Amino acid sequence: MAVKARDQEPESPVDWLENELRETKARLHKVEGELDQALKQVWSLEADVRRVAEAFCFASDKRRPGATVRTSAR
């Protein structure tokens, strides 16, 4: 809740509730943005891990004579 100067009238319950709602919506919007950014980072990390795993499997299969290359169905 915002601090009011002494010469101002106290907020009405409706004004207080509207201010709380506005501040809560702003905080929620910020958290939504942070969550979206975190999700993008997770997807990027997951793609990097998949590429490393595929490269590792390819490298280990390449070293074994007569080995077949495994593929995943995704």
Image (spheres, rainbow, N blue to C red):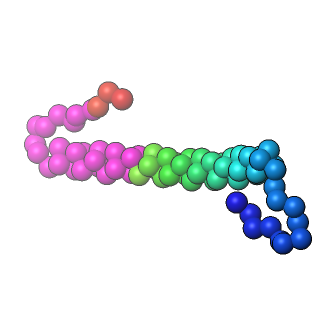
Question: In which quadrant is the C terminus drawn?
Answer: top left
> Which of 58/46 is in front?
46
Q: Residue at x 28, y 47 (%)?
A: 53
Instruction: Where is residue 51? Give x, y as percent.
Output: 35, 48
Q: Residue at x 71, y 50 (%)?
A: 20
Q: Is residue 10 magenta?
A: no
Instruction: Where is residue 19? Give x, y as percent.
Output: 76, 51
Q: Is residue 10 above or below residue 61?
A: below
Which span is picked out in magenta? 46-71
Q: Is residue 50 left or right of residue 12?
A: left
Q: Is residue 12 left or right of residue 33?
A: right
Q: Is residue 17 left or right of residue 40?
A: right
Evaluate whether residue 33 shows in this view: no
Q: Is residue 59 magenta?
A: yes
Q: Residue at x 79, y 44 (%)?
A: 14
Q: Residue at x 66, y 49 (%)?
A: 24
